[in-house]
Image: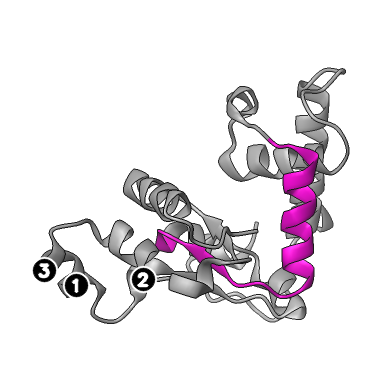
């Protein structure tokens, strides 16, 4: 029984069991996903690694049926990460879920569009959502970037509108 349960402050010798470290938990989670998703899997190669990561992050095997992960898109995303492309997302939750320990060494920055100063006022003035205003404010930064839409459909709709209007596409 640890000191944490007794109400006393834990001493410096308190350590996680090796099976409780983040890497061990992640490894076990991936093994469970591998066991639960029978061969042939809906994706292979790098696309499977992306799909497996998404299932792990969401804790939901059913999302596999909703994914579309062409190998070319996966390769484009990897190339963008390798060149340090910025990541833009529409929610703080999605931003917080980006593993900076993996992105920092690549020079990748992660920004939430909703955190842009003055965005709320701009959106109110224009009568649009903050997600739409944030996406539209990207301008030239959109080209070659990575865009992760968390839960704002207006961010996705704005992105599609920008692409229809000839904006440079994200990675």
Gap in angstroms between the C-alphas marked 1 and 2: 10 Å
Direction from residue 59 to residue 112 in the image, left or right = left
Local crowd size for mark 1, using a 10 Å CA cut-off: few (<14), some (14–19), many (≥20): some
State yes or no: residue 28 in magenta: no
Which numbered marker is on residue 137?
Answer: 2
Question: Mark 3 or 2 closer to N-term?
Answer: 3
- The vertical placement of 163 against 89, above or below, is above
| Image x and y of residue 152, in percent | 35, 48
Determine contact: label 3, label 1, CB under 8 Å: yes
**Which tag, 1 or 2, sits closer to the chain's start?**
1
Q: Is residue 14 visible?
A: no
x and y percent of residue 155 in the render? Answer: 37, 52
Q: Which residues are magenta?
A: 69-92
Local secondary structure at mark 3: helix
Q: Which corner quadrant of the image does residue 52 belong to?
A: top right
Q: Which residue is mark 1?
A: 122
What residue appears at the point 42 percent right and 54 percent down from the top-left corner? 165
Dot 2 crowding, Cα within 10 Å, few <14, some 14–19, many 20+: some
Residue 64: which numbered mark, if any? none
Distance Cα–Cα, label 3 vs label 1: 5 Å
- Report the front residue among 128 and 48: 128
**Circle 1: element type:** helix
Position of residue 37 measured from the top left corner of the image (x, y, whole percent): 77, 22
């Amino acid at each position: 029984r640890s000191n944490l349960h007794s109400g006393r402050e834990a001493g410096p010798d308190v350590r996680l069991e090796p099976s409780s470290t983040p890497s061990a938990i992640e490894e076990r989670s991936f093994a469970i996903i591998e066991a639960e998703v029978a061969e042939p899997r809906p994706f292979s190669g790098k696309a499977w690694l992306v799909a497996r990561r998404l299932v792990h992050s969401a804790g939901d095997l059913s999302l596999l049926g909703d994914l579309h992960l062409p190998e070319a898109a996966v390769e484009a995303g990897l190339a963008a990460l390798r060149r340090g492309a910025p990541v833009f997302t529409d929610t703080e939750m999605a931003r917080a879920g980006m593993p900076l320990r993996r992105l920092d060494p690549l020079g990748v920055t992660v920004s939430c569009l909703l955190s842009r100063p003055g965005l709320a006022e701009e959106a109110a003035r224009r009568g649009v959502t903050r997600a739409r205003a944030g996406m539209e404010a990207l301008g030239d930064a959109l080209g070659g970037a990575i865009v992760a839409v968390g839960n704002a459909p207006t961010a996705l709709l704005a992105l599609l509108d920008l692409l229809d209007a000839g904006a440079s596409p994200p990675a």
